[in-house]
Image (cartoon, rainbow, N blue to C red):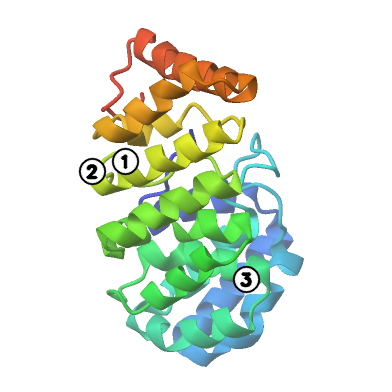
Amino acid sequence: MTEPLRSSEEVAGPLWERLEPGPAGWLRERLADVGERPEAVRPVFPAVGRKIGRGPLDPEGSDDDVHAWTIDDAGRTLLLAGLGERAADELPDLYRFGDAAERRGLLRALPYLPIGDAALGLVDDAIRTNDTSLIAAALGPYATEHLDDAGYSQAVLKCVFSGIPIAPLDGIPERVTPDGARMLAAFVHERIAAGRDVPAEVWLVIDRHPPAAELQAIEAELESEVSDRRRAAIRTLEARSAKAASGEPLNETPR
């Protein structure tokens, strides 16, 4: 599971370790510029990836992990953190005119900025896209703190629908509500009825607050006259049983 970076210091440490002297010097100069003139972030922000790199922040990380930070994510986070309270004024245009990488870096930075709920609209916009990297970046600690229950539940459902792993999401399972568990269980039943599989991690959400009616509907598919539905139900419920047999309580955060 990808562990969240909880402070800007936790972002800065791995970043400086990854940077060669040239890129590190460029970033330090830009941080100084932004500290003196907040508007200096505007031309700098798009150049970060080209100047310091775009690979995984974790040298052992994978380019395919939508939850993993990149070097340019970290660089953009430090730039925005350097703005302090002035970041709120710059975020809308940086997001609006940014490409996917710029938007992702901005979304990663939100938990480290003293902006209250001023960027919640940007989080909502990212979740509505079909870009899995933006959705994953949006659902960090900032979203956990500021999304209401319905918004958080809808975002988790969007992740499962889009194929984004939910176990690494900040707030799972603590932010799960009974309605969120019910929504996801209903979606699982729809997938089974279509003869399709779901990731085993859905049970982290569903079994936080087990919804009786939806679980009964899933179990009833074991008796379906349609073989694809029966097999999908068997696989799904076997995954649930395997999770329970692993010794990790279904309503606890996995360790």
Residue 199 location (% of width, % of height): 53, 31
- Picture layout, residue 15 above or below residue 224: below
Specify the amino acid type for callout 3: Glu
> Residue drawn at (45%, 49%), measured in percent from left and top?
157
Between marks 1 and 3 in the image, the one whose residue lies nearer the viewer: 1
Q: Earlier in the sequence, mark 1 or mark 3?
A: 3
Report helix, strand or loop for mark 3: helix
Badge 3, how many Cα within 10 Å: few under 14, some, many 20+?
Answer: many
> Residue drawn at (57%, 53%), measured in percent from left and top?
16
**Disc 1 designates what residue?**
181
**Disc 2 designates what residue?**
178
- Picture layout, residue 153 above or below residue 134: above
Circles 1 and 2: CB atoms closer than 8 Å? yes
* CA separation in Å, label 3 and label 2: 35 Å
**Image quadrant in which the C terminus is located:** top left
Residue 27 location (% of width, % of height): 61, 69
Specify the amino acid type for callout 2: Pro
* CA separation in Å, label 1 and label 2: 5 Å
**Disc 3 designates what residue?**
102
